[in-house]
Image (spheres, coloured by chain):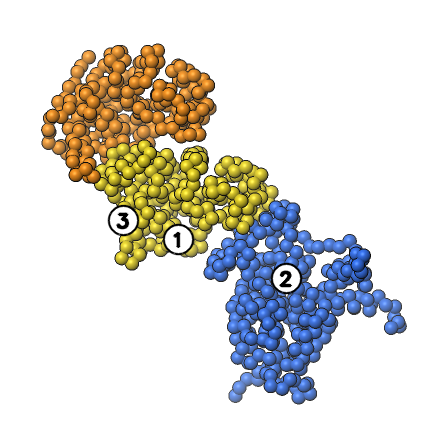
């Protein structure tokens, strides 16, 4: 198991590199720099990512490690284009071509998120009148799958995750944290994303469901998916990850 | 050398005219301006043309538009018929006919076939019109879209862009509320496949008479200051839906006086017990039919 | 993918006040673009200018009509009034903040929906009625209210009726000006959810103007933040809301009460 550790030193900003991208990779993040400027608090600036890079190939599962506030979440959100990086490139294989997420246009990002890049977030956005099945089946239906097929797939995932059947057709507004998390997982795992980002996917689950998630991740790896995740749970991480990327805090 | 103008000013000395008034009451410039507007109206069938409506010796709502149109086109050798709800003998008809007799000294008649100009309120004569006759209609509200759109600017745009869907909304509402298109009179029509027009409050029974009529049809609204026209042999089509086609009124009784089953009948209440008669609204038509019915030699 | 609508350097001034200052963006098919800003930011003016309901001072709006046979883009500012009105009837829709401005209050609900059909030449009463019923169902108004006047409807129902009225001719682009303004929170939620479903099922493109961040989060894919007539920030909705860069955006987000 290789271990790539990067210390967050102050490095100069690079212009986009023109190094060739490895053919077999699915995602290639290069020299990401990201900071936050709070204008309404005197304009203070926090640098968080300083020159972070990562390459993932099919079957990889990379654990992002580091103390709280060290930038793991920022890095993941930057990959998903939820945060905008200040400089660097994030290349993803999309529809057979390399696309740079850092500079892609809005409609391209929407397309990438639809087909090529999945995200299991910590929060589930609940809309009062939409049932759990509908919420979870939406991304799959967005890729063009028939509603009945999509919902069946989601239901089978719900079963595996031990989500009680009586909850399937009601809105997740009243669900517990663990139940919401399982809806989130089913939502992301239903689609065959080549790259999947997992933000603390087992934080609210009991031991049984944790092992279900481990199994699901293993299946994805076998299918050739590349996963990048933040795992609080050491045992889960040990079971699924073959790489790790460690983030260190600033002083 | 001036051209010889038609004789619309000085009548024959033999015919007496009320002193102090110009022929047909209006001054010549006004008549010319109204005639210019009428020419525009004839050139654009069904389209409303504004005109400078003058103060007339009767108030708005009493036919001033129709009277001004008649006054502008009538000549010394015309014969005028005036009807109100089909009858020559109602107060209004009599007054208007007398008015024109006073200020023009022209011949008047109650017979449709004899008239060259027919001014009407709310009916078209049963007797078919012929080429050379002119119908003048009294119009209260000229704008067919007024009920749905109060703004004049907007309705003018709608006419110019042929946006007439709103009128069908009204017919839709009728069918929804009453099960059929309830508009009984002033039924909207499409003139020459282009402009939507209100034919004045004639019963819808009369709408088909407007279509391809050999006569010239002029419409005047005095209060609203608009006039419009339908030239002879112009298509006039009543609006409807495919599954609710336009239909006219029917009666299950003939006229009490002349026995006609083809004319528009008025209902007349005869006593307090609910007795009623149906008789032709067109008095001239009814009288002539009655005259034909009498055996020869009888008075 | 070609954009459905291109707005380029759109500007509109009222005297000394620049209501819209060189606004540019592109809208792609199936996208919902939110425009957020406070009152007076120019967002409603922008919407009216795009629809050419008020004249812009400068700039260009180009619409690539999928229904246009020639495939030629339409320059909205130079087409004739007749073409513009046709466009507004067939391919565009405008949902107004107050349903009363977007409905005919004196005709029945069914007639309100059927009007656009009748405008475009439909002349079969029975079919028009069937279509109107279908749309009432789509916007969750009981069909037995079809022959009632909109004045008897609640605010939320009126707004849904407006939606139905606009969607009946299956427009490609819908402009919405504060569609949930003035409604109760629960009524808003229902309307937003309905809008969400309809936008997805009909593959609509929407430009949605609002000051409510909750509405944006729920509906919009992309977001334009306007302040004093300018676009200060734009991007994907979650980008702008989770990682605001501009100081105005940051203060707008932090002022929100509900996450």
- Disc 1 chain ID: C
Name the residue beneath numbered marker 2.
Answer: B201
Please state, as top left, top right, bottom left or bottom right, where the C terminus of chain C lies in the image: top left
Q: Is residue A174 left or right of residue C119?
A: left
**Alpha carbon separation for disc pair 3 and 2:** 56 Å
Label 2 sits on a secondary structure element that is: loop
* Dot 3 and dot 2 residues touching (CB under 8 Å): no
Query: Which circle, 3 or 2, is nearer the viewer?
Result: 3
Q: What residue is disc 1 on?
A: C53
Please give the name of the residue rendered at 31% of the width and 49% of the height, measured from the top-left corner. Answer: C40
Chain on which label 2 sits: B
Look at the picture and state if B8 lies above or below A24. Answer: below
Rendered shade, chain B: blue
Q: Tag 3, which chain?
A: C
> What residue does disc 3 label?
C228
Where residue B167 appears, as percent x and y from the top left, is: 56, 53
* Residue drawn where x is 16% and y is 34% of the image: A45
Q: CA distance from mark 1 to mark 3?
A: 21 Å
Picture colour for chain A = orange
Chain C, hue in figure:
yellow
* Other residues around mark 1 within 10 Å, as few (<14) / some (14–19) / many (≥20): few
- Between B103 and A114, the one lying in front of the other is B103
State which mark lies toward you, 1 or 3.
Answer: 3
Which residue lies at the image location 23% right of the left edge and 25% below the top edge? A73
Q: Name the spot of residue C21 as percent of width and height, x first.
A: 27, 50
Question: Pointer 3: residues within 10 angstroms few (<14), some, or many (20+)?
Answer: some
Q: Is residue A148 left or right of residue A221?
A: right
| CA gap, disc 1 and disc 2 | 37 Å
């Amino acid at each position: 198991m290789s271990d790539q550790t990067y210390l967050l030193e102050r490095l100069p900003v690079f212009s986009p590199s023109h190094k060739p991208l490895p053919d077999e990779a699915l995602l290639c993040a290069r020299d990401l720099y990201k900071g936050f400027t709070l204008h309404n608090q005197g304009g203070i600036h926090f640098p968080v990512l300083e020159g972070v890079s990562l390459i993932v190939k099919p079957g990889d599962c990379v654990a992002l490690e580091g103390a709280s506030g060290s930038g793991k979440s920022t890095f993941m959100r930057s990959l998903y284009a939820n945060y905008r990086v200040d400089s660097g490139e994030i290349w993803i294989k999309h529809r057979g071509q390399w696309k740079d997420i850092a500079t892609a246009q809005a409609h391209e990002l929407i397309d990438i998120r639809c087909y090529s890049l999945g995200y299991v977030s910590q929060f589930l956005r609940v809309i009062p009148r939409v049932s759990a099945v509908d919420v979870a089946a939406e991304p799959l239906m967005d890729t063009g799958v028939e509603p009945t097929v999509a919902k069946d797939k989601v239901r089978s995932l719900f079963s595996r995750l031990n989500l009680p059947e009586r909850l399937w057709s009601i809105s997740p507004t009243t669900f517990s944290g663990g139940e919401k998390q399982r809806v989130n997982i089913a939502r992301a795992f239903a689609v065959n994303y080549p790259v999947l980002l997992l933000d603390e996917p087992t934080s609210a689950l009991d031991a049984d469901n944790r092992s279900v998630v481990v199994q699901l991740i293993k299946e994805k790896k076998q299918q050739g998916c590349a996963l990048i995740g933040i795992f609080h749970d050491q045992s889960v991480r040990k079971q699924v990850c073959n790489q790790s990327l460690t983030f260190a805090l600033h002083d | 050398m001036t051209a010889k103008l038609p004789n619309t000013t000085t009548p024959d000395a033999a015919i007496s005219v009320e002193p102090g008034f110009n022929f047909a009451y209006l001054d010549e410039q006004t008549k010319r301006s109204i005639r210019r507007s009428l020419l525009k109206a004839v050139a654009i069938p069904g389209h409303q043309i504004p005109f400078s409506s003058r103060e007339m010796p009767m108030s708005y709502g009493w036919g001033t538009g129709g009277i001004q149109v008649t006054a502008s086109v009538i000549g010394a050798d015309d014969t005028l018929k005036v009807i109100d709800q089909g009858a020559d003998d109602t107060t209004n008809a009599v007054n208007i006919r007398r008015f024109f007799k006073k200020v023009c000294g022209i011949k008047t008649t109650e017979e449709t076939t004899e008239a060259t100009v027919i001014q009407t309120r709310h009916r078209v004569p049963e007797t078919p019109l012929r080429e050379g006759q002119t119908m003048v209609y009294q119009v209260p509200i000229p704008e067919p879209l007024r009920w749905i759109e109060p703004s004049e600017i907007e309705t003018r745009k709608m006419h110019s862009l042929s946006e007439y869907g709103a009128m069908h909304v009204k017919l839709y509402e009728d069918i929804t509320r009453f099960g059929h298109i309830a508009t009984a009179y002033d039924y909207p029509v499409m003139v020459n496949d282009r402009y939507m027009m209100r034919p004045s409050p004639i019963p819808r029974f009369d709408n088909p008479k407007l279509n391809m009529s050999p006569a010239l049809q002029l419409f005047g609204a005095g209060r609203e200051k608009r006039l419009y026209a339908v030239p002879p042999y112009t298509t006039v089509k009543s609006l409807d839906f495919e599954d609710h086609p336009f239909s006219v009124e029917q009666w299950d009784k003939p006229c009490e006086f002349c026995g006609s089953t083809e004319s528009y009948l008025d209902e007349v209440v005869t006593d307090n017990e609910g007795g009623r008669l149906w008789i032709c609204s067109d008095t001239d038509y009814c009288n002539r039919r009655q005259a034909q019915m009498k055996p020869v030699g009888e008075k | 993918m070609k954009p459905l609508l291109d707005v380029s350097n759109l500007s509109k001034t009222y005297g000394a006040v620049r209501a819209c200052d060189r606004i540019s963006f592109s809208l792609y098919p199936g996208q919902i673009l939110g425009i957020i800003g406070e009152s007076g930011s120019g967002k409603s003016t922008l919407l009216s200018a795009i629809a050419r309901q008020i004249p812009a001072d400068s700039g260009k709006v180009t619409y690539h009509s999928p229904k246009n046979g020639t495939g030629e883009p339409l320059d909205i500012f130079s087409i004739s009034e007749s073409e513009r009105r046709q466009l507004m009837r067939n391919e565009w829709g405008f949902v107004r903040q107050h349903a009363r401005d977007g409905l005919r209050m004196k005709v029945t609900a069914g007639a309100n929906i059927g009007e656009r059909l009748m405008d475009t030449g439909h002349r079969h009463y029975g079919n028009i009625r069937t279509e109107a019923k279908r749309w009432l169902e789509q916007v969750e108004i009981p069909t037995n209210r079809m022959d009632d006047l909109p004045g008897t409807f609640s605010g939320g129902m009126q707004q849904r009726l407006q939606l139905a009225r606009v969607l009946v001719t299956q427009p490609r682009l819908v402009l919405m000006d504060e569609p949930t303004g003035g409604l109760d929170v629960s009524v808003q939620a229902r309307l937003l959810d309905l809008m969400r479903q309809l936008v997805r099922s009909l593959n609509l493109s929407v430009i949605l103007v609002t000051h409510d961040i909750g509405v944006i989060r729920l509906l919009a894919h992309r977001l334009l933040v306007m302040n004093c007539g300018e676009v200060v920030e734009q991007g994907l909705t979650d980008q702008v809301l989770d990682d605001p860069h501009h100081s105005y955006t940051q203060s707008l987000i932090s002022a929100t009460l509900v996450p």
